[in-house]
Image (cartoon, rainbow, N blue to C red):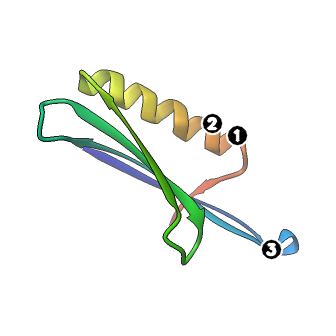
Amino acid sequence: MSCQLLYRVDPDLNMARFYRVEVLPDLFGEIIVERRWGRIGGGGQFRAASYRSTFLAEAAASALFRAKERRGYRVAS
């Protein structure tokens, strides 16, 4: 499926964050959108949501990705 990793680093604010959005199948035929976020180097937190179709899951993941880009996160290189 797809996985996007974003970083937001600002040394002046002592900020070093990551945000990962991943679309995965589960064992029951649904599609999971897993979000993981936290400080770079740490385990962070996560939340998962299930969707009935890949189309809906990809749309939700894209919306999350765009929202984080508006907040200053950039794609990891």
Q: Amino acid at mark 3?
A: Asn
Q: Write the residue at 19% across / 40% down.
A: 25
- Establish if 57 lies above or below 68: above
Q: Mark 3 and 2 residues: CB-CB less than 8 Å, in contact?
A: no
x and y percent of residue 24 in the render? 25, 43
- Residue 14's disc is 3
| Residue that label 1 marks | 70
Choose between 33 and 75: the one closer to the eye: 33
x and y percent of residue 27 in the render? 12, 41
Q: Quadrant of the N terminus?
A: top left
Asked which secondary structure carries label 2, the reply is helix
Asked which secondary structure carries label 3, the reply is loop
Q: Write the residue at 31% across / 46% down.
A: 2
Q: Earlier in the sequence, mark 3 or mark 1?
A: 3
x and y percent of residue 4 in the render? 43, 51
| Residue that label 2 marks | 67
Q: Amino acid at mark 2?
A: Ala
Please tell me in which quadrant of the rendered image residue 38 appears.
Answer: bottom right
Q: Residues within 10 Å of mark 1 (few under 14, many from 20)?
A: few
Q: Write the residue at 52% across / 30% down.
A: 63
Q: Is residue 19 visible?
A: no
Q: Write the residue at 12% across / 30% down.
A: 29
